[in-house]
């Protein structure tokens, strides 16, 4: 068969490896919701280790510069929801991978913080903290003029979140998904043997 020298067919959802120089990415033209011109959507089907198959999609419009990226589960909604909890104490803990489906919320109880359900994404604990700090910091100059008392409280909250990011104290992070399609990495996975 021409073009297939290995004689084996590649699976639809492949593991990401450092040896994969050219992962299979599908590109297609699609309409930009921002300017209604043609942009480019890229789809990448892959497996996340110890989790499941996902579709990573990104859209870019060269006309207006609009960009969007999201993650969608490629498996069915699970029969039961999931709740993951982790105590964050070390730099390795900050690097724990998080797959957040569009139904999941992330909570940090010590701060009484909850990140509402939004589009699906792959990040890590550090990324959750960093993105929250960036989002809160973005509107601060205007808030300091319009509502200085609220801006002051947000500055205090940002400082508390930075302390967590610097690991000044341990904290718990909770990932709660009623659809069951989210995941919080365990850096110490174990396998139960079959009595061997």
Image (cartoon, rainbow, N blue to C red):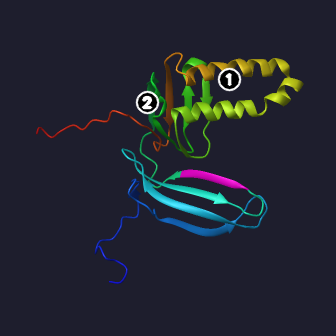
The residue shown at (56%, 28%) is 107
Residue beneath disc 1: 158
Q: Is residue 99 above or below residue 154?
A: below
Instruction: Report which residue position mark 2 lands on.
Output: 92
Q: Position of residue 165 (x, y in %)?
A: 56, 25
Q: Farthest right residue?
A: 145
Residue 112 showing in the rendered view:
no
Q: Is residue 28 above or below residue 184?
A: below
Above or below, comparing residue 67 to residue 183 in the picture: below
Residue 124 sits inside the magenta stretch? no
Left or right: where does residue 187 sit relative to residue 32? left
Main secondary structure found in the magenta portion: strand
Is residue 70 in the magenta section?
yes
* Image quarter of residue 133: top right
Q: Residue 51 at x, y = what percent? A: 39, 45
Q: Quadrant of the C terminus?
A: top left
Q: Position of residue 130 (x, y in %)?
A: 61, 32
Going 70% across and 34% down the picture, which residue do you hit?
135
Badge 2 crowding class, 10 Å Cα cut-off, few under 14, some 14 to 19, many 20 or more, is: few
Q: Which residues are magenta?
A: 66-71
Residue at position x 50%, y 33% in the image: 175
Mark 2 lies on a secondary structure that is helix
Q: Extreme bottom residue here?
A: 2
């Amino acid at each position: 068969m021409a073009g297939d020298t290995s004689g084996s067919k590649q699976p639809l959802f492949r593991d990401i490896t450092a040896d994969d120089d050219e992962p299979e990415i599908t590109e297609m033209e699609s309409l930009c919701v921002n300017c209604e011109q043609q942009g480019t959507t890229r789809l990448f089907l892959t497996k996340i280790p110890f989790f499941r198959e996902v579709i990573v999609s990104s859209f870019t419009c060269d006309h207006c510069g609009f960009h969007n990226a999201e993650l969608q589960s490629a498996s069915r909604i699970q029969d039961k929801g999931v709740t993951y909890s982790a105590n964050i104490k070390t730099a390795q803990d900050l690097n724990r991978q998080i797959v957040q489906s569009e139904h999941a919320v992330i909570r940090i109880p010590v701060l009484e913080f909850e990140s509402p359900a939004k589009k699906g994404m792959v990040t890590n604990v550090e990324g959750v903290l960093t993105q929250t700090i960036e989002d809160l910091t973005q509107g601060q100059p205007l808030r300091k003029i319009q509502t200085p008392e609220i801006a002051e409280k947000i500055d205090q909250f940002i400082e508390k979140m930075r302390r967590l990011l610097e690991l000044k104290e341990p904290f718990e992070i909770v990932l709660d998904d009623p659809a069951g399609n989210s995941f919080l990495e365990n850096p110490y996975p174990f396998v139960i043997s079959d009595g061997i």
